[in-house]
Amino acid sequence: AQKITQTQPGMFVQEKEAVTLDCTYDTSDPSYGLFWYKQPSSGEMIFLIYQGSYDQQNATEGRYSLNFQKARKSANLVISASQLGDSAMYFCAMRDSAGGTSYGKLTFGQGTILTVHP
Amino acid sequence: NAGVMQNPRHLVRRRGQEARLRCSPMKGHSHVYWYRQLPEEGLKFMVYLQKENIIDESGMPKERFSAEFPKEGPSILRIQQVVRGDSAAYFCASSPLAGGQYFGPGTRLTVL
């Protein structure tokens, strides 16, 4: 069975500094995808970044980068130059290959609440 | 290109009533997923549908819950005889054949 673990219930960071949000996963499937979503207080789920298990390079999207360490089964999110608007809940999620297809359900971690201080 | 649409955004029902939640996927997306988020928890998968087909319903409660994605119109998540424990945020996500899942704004269901 798949499992996603986010061990940090809450994180604090000073504005303009970088912060790393931890995510570890467990799966026996050789093909999988890893996602990060942001959920602000308004409640919507905002897609941030995606990493495929066969991708050779770490994914980057603007200020977001994914530190993918396959052997350690970790997929940490790095946010550079934090902004006040980054304060939100962040979820790590994994998608398996659904029996050979390239799409399937997402399994989510419990989330990390990030608070950015001015 | 409009995003995933969900309505209503907020729904209040009394115990025993029915709740119908609607989801219109993004244009060009043929896959729809429903997730439930209980307070202070992450999202939990409920069901995955393609047009006129349920692909994976392993996360659906065995009773009172059903989902459909007809050939025409939105996907519907239906909860019959709601109970207080059904109070949650219900999210719909859509994806193309391959790629990330894009979420709608969610429907907050409150059962009185």
Image: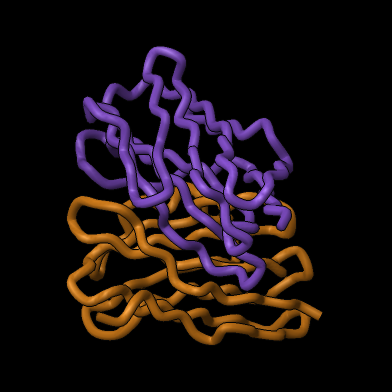
Viewer-closest of A54 and B74: A54
Report x, y in % for residue A87.
64, 58
**Image point (60%, 81%), residue name:** B19
Q: Quadrant of residue B89?
A: bottom right
Q: Chain A takes which shade in the image? A: purple
**Image point (47%, 42%), residue name:** A93
Report x, y in % for residue A31.
27, 28
Q: Chain B takes which shade in the image? A: orange
Viewer-closest of A105 and A36: A36
Question: Which residue of the protein is positioned furthest toward the top in this rendering?
Answer: A71
In-image side of B15 versus B91 (left or right): right
Q: Quadrant of residue B36?
A: bottom right
Give the total of numbered labels: 0
The quarter of the picture where the C terminus of chain B appears is bottom right
The quarter of the picture where the N terminus of chain B appears is bottom left
Compared to residue A1, the image places residue B70 above or below, namely below
